[in-house]
Amino acid sequence: MSHSSILSPASTELAQHVAQGLRRTPKTLSSMYFYDDAGSRLFQQIMELPEYYPTRAEFAIFREHGAAIAAALSPAGGGEFAVVELGAGDGAKTKLLLRELLAGGAPFTYAPVDISAGAMTGLVATLAAELPALRVAPVVEDYATALAQLRTWPGSKAVLFLGSNIGNFGPTERLDFLRQLAEPLGAADRLLMGFDLQKDPRSIRAAYDDAQGVTAAFNLNLLTRLNRELGADFDLAHWQHYTDYSPLSGAVRSFLVSTRAQAVRVAALDETFEFAAWEVIHTENSFKFTLPQVEALAAEVGLRVVTSFTDAAGDFADVVLARQLSHD
Ligand code: AVJ
């Protein structure tokens, strides 16, 4: 295989990310790269797992409070608006909300944004079949590119960021990202964000280390992707998935553990990386929040909580946010 000569722009970006992440100590790779088409399918399997409660909890919130959420997202005057969803995936939960919004009668266009073309094709097909009246404007981009486009979007908008995707950002990146999300919002615009809440630490840890090993396969798929796209030679027999949860920081951290001393060559970089026995690559953060933390976070980026909804068990929160009213 010759990978070093011709790389697509996307692979060049991935190659640069891998070079930076694997030259550092400790080594890190971003969970953003989990979502190739195989990774998106594995995440859909994760959402079905008995241990993975966030999806079911958010479903329960939408089932119970869908009409109230739709009302809180629709512009007060009843005008035309856009519903932009960052990280739409298979859109299963969003369909509940979209039904409520259609029933509300306010005219809107649904603009799902997802980094996986495969996931988007599937979503567009199921929407056409299940909600034929819905206007859909799909965007296959990463968040940063989609946010830049959002700035030039005309008219009112409701931005959805569900499933506790916000949990993947570390504290500093989280503030930067939320400021970028808040900045293009007008006074009537709304932001709906899902937050996974702090709870029994054992349930949280189990959600990221399931008995069937689907989460392990999801994490390890990143190495398969690097083998395929960058001509790397990771031997998956010598890598393991490991996860911990700290109730102090609220962070689930996931790692790929090198089970022996090994060297891995990445042809696209023409570089070999050395791993000591039991050295790790940190691949993901999934932060868990308390409701007071959500309030404080909103205030810090110029947003206010309009209303929020939790499931009966208090496992998860969906929070409607708007720009802070200025007090001058
Ligand atoms: C898609 C970011 C919400 O952090 O819970 C699931 C990804 N990682 N299991 C999460 C994930 C491992 C998921 N999000």
Image: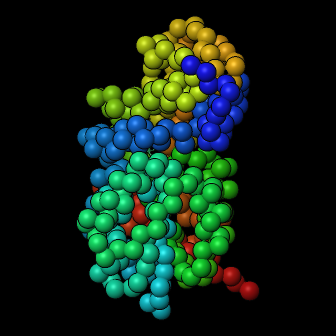
Farthest-out residue, right:
328
Question: Residue, x 62% and y 66% (percent of image)?
Answer: 149
Question: Residue, x 60% and y 68% (percent of image)?
Answer: 150
Decide if residue 207 is on the left or right side of residue 186: left
**Residue 131: x %, y % from top left:** 28, 70
Vertical arrangement, residue 71 with respect to residue 86, above or below: below
**Residue sitting nearer the eye, 16 or 24:** 16
Farthest-out residue, bottom:
77
Which quadrant contains ligand 1?
Answer: top left
Q: Quadrant of the N terminus?
A: top right
Question: Residue, x 47% and y 48% (percent of image)?
Answer: 116
Question: Residue, x 60% and y 15% (percent of image)?
Answer: 264
**Residue sitting nearer the eye, 177 or 156:** 156
Vertical arrangement, residue 125 with respect to residue 247, above or below: below
**Residue 180: x %, y % from top left:** 66, 62
Vertical arrangement, residue 220 with respect to residue 87, above or below: above
Decide if residue 48 is on the left or right side of residue 283: left
Figure colour scheme: rainbow
Whether residue 274 is visible, yes or no, is yes
**Residue 85: x %, y % from top left:** 47, 63
**Residue sitting nearer the eye, 112 or 253:** 112
Q: Quadrant of the C terminus?
A: bottom right
Whether residue 22 is visible, yes or no, is no
Vertical arrangement, residue 16 with respect to residue 286, above or below: above
**Residue 61: x %, y % from top left:** 32, 63
